[in-house]
Each structure stands twice: as structure tokens, then as C-alpha cells.
Image: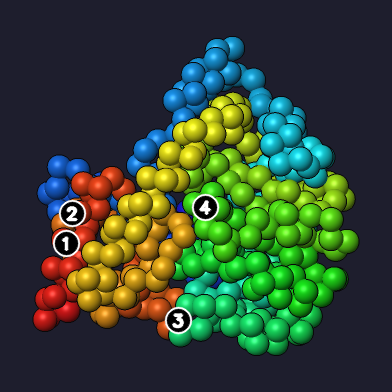
Amino acid sequence: MNPTLAPAASASLIRREVAGLPSYDPGADTDEVAALSGAGRVIKLSNSEIPYGPSPAVAEAVRLGTAAGFARYPDPTGKRLTEAIGNHLDVPADRIVLGNGSENILELLCRAVLDPGDLVVTQAPGFSLHEIFPRVMGARVEKVPVTAEFGFDADAWRRALAAGPKLVFLANPCNPTGAILNSAELARVVDGTPESALLVLDEAYGEFARPDQSYPDGLEALRGLDRPWIVLRTFSKAYGLAGLRVGYGIASDNALVRALDRVRTPYNVNRPAQDAAMAALGDHAHLADTVSRTRLEIARVAGRLRAAGLRVVPSSTNFLFIDTGRPSDRIARELHRAGIIVKAWREPGYETYIRASLSTPEDNDVFVRCLTETCAKDEL
């Protein structure tokens, strides 16, 4: 067979919805940036990873949990973990669904709920998978923009919700801006969402925001409402388990969980991930220390960047959304030469912004210096 014929033959089989999708951007490859820069160590600020690592209890839990070897499948229901989460949140375990990261649950929701032509409402700028997964199913996506000051545009949300979406994705805190909706703003979204729609509240970065007095607990805001909803959370961010991929959702009712179970793979959360999440969930002191150190560093770095003349969106997360005043792709390439990886934002209207998740104070100081020097270059 002529191998040159394969791509064209394959292309004819691909659904048009898939062929037209934007690609998810995971950030630059660490090895490629190391080779380009010649740096002994690359500073990776593109994926919202925690520099402090998970709870020390995690490694021991994984070691003990896998002592019997890797030849056995994990519990497909994640019974121990869902019960632990349920006890932690005062929610019945049968209303909790586990995912290979919370983004896996986003995908399952789209597969279980959406028909071609359905309307999905989300925010802009926003997490790309809030758009990509619905479009895979042939759904239409309307993105509600923030205000010029990156605030909540109540009128725009009211108009979008009045159009009758079947699914509403709302990230609080917002990815990529780091901004939050307060209780009144969240209530306006909840009140405006048709009862026939599923409201999905994505709180992947919620642990970082909870010390803010203005940040509402989404589960408490939705608990008891007689309408479909699900709150998504993850162990990948503040708990430091990004490499193990385990997230969860708390649903309004068990019927929604059962529907997601029908469209997921039966072993979507592996044994080490379940064991690690159990240990991480129980170490409240480590989580509190991670959140405290992260918030202090966010405030410090944001202050230095603003003092250098850059616009930085106020953030309640572990990352900053920074207007460089120049094409973000060029800024990212220049930082690659210095051995630093950030995420260049390419969403229309925000092409001069980068998102940078913070690392250790020493790494962050290098980032601030390199970014300000790069932005000062006339040729960019």
C-alpha cells in the first residue's frame, strides 16, 4: 500500500464537526524549549501545576495501595473515594461521579446531554474545552464576553441565557483570567438559566479562591435547588495531583450520575489516582499551606508586573492573565529562548495576553525579569 494515500483516505472519514475543531493547546514541549534555550532547567508556567507537590501522605498511600501489583483493575465505581468525598462535603456518595481529571467529566456531560444543534453558553475568554467538547457533539456554542475590566456582564449573560441553552458552562474562578463571580453574580446566572438546562459550575481552581470573602461556595449555592446542576472540582490543581488525573463532580441527583456512568469507560480513574486522592483529601494542613503560599506569591508577582507597566487581571487562582501589549505568540517564543514556558492566549480579542501559572519565588523572579525585558524590546 502506498503510504502517501493514507492521510487523504483517512480525512474522508472524519466527521465535519471534528475536522473543524481548534486544537487544545497544552503549551510548548519542555525538551524542545530546553534544546532551544540551552537552559539547564526549564521553568514551566503553562499548565497550572503546583511547585510544592502533593501531601507527603500521597506517596505512602500510593505505595501501600499498589503493593498487590498493577495487574488488577481499579474499582470501577471508586466507592471508597466517592464515600470520602461525600463525607467531606455532606453529600450522598451516589451523587458523586469521578473522572480522569474534571475535564473528563466535561466530555462525559457533552456526550450524555447534547444533540446536534443544541445551544451551549459559556464565557469568553474561557477554557477551550468548554467549547471543543460541545462542538464535537455538533452543538452550537455562544461565548459571553467579560466587561472591559474583566468583570461579569449581567446583561450579556441574561440575553444569552434567554436563548434557551441546553448546557451552561460557568467557570468560577475563571480560566484563564483568574477572576471570580461573587454571590450576587452567581445567583443571577443561576436564576437566569432555564430549568430545562443543565448548569455546570466548574470550580477547578476553587480551593485557591475560598479565602476570598466574596467567593461563593458553588455547592452551597446550588444545594437543594430543584433543577439539574453539577459542580466540578479536581485534585489536579491545589492538591498537586496533576500527573495522576483525578477529578470529581457533585450532581443535583443520582439520575445524572447514572447517565454519566453509561457513557464513561468503566475504569476511567486508575488505582494509584484513587489512593492518592484519598490521602490528599485528608491532609487539610498541606492544602491550606499550599493555598496560602500561592496567594502570597500571586500578589507579589502581580504587583511587580504592574509596577513594570503591564496590565494584570486580579487573580484568585495560581495563575496570572497578563496583557503584554504585543502578539502573545512572539512573547512566548522569546521566553522559550530564556527557558520559560507560558501559554500564549489565541482567543479572538485576547491575542496579546499570556497566562502564566506561578512556580517557586526564585523561578517567578526569573520570569518577571525575562518578561519585562522581552516586553521592552522595540522589535516586538
User: Label 3 is placed on what type of residue?
Assistant: Glu
First in residue order: circle 4 vs circle 2: 4
Camera-nearest residue between 296 and 354 = 296
Provide the residue designation for mark 1.
Answer: 370
First in residue order: circle 3 vs circle 2: 3
Is label 2 in a helix, a strand or a loop? helix
Q: Could you say which quadrant of the image residue 314 lies in?
A: bottom left
What residue is rendered at 49% in x and 46% in y?
Answer: 237
What residue is rendered at 71% in x and 70% in y?
Answer: 187
Residue 337: x and y in percent read 16, 59
- Checking the image for residue 366, the label placed there is 2
User: Label 1 is placed on what type of residue?
Assistant: Cys
Residue 77, placed above or below residue 15: above
User: Label 4 is placed on what type of residue?
Assistant: Pro
Q: Nearer the viewer, mark 1 or mark 4?
A: 4
- Checking the image for residue 211, the label placed there is 4
| Horizontal arrangement in the rendering, residue 13 relative to residue 44 (left or right) | right
Instruction: Name, please, the residue furthest toward the front.
Output: 213
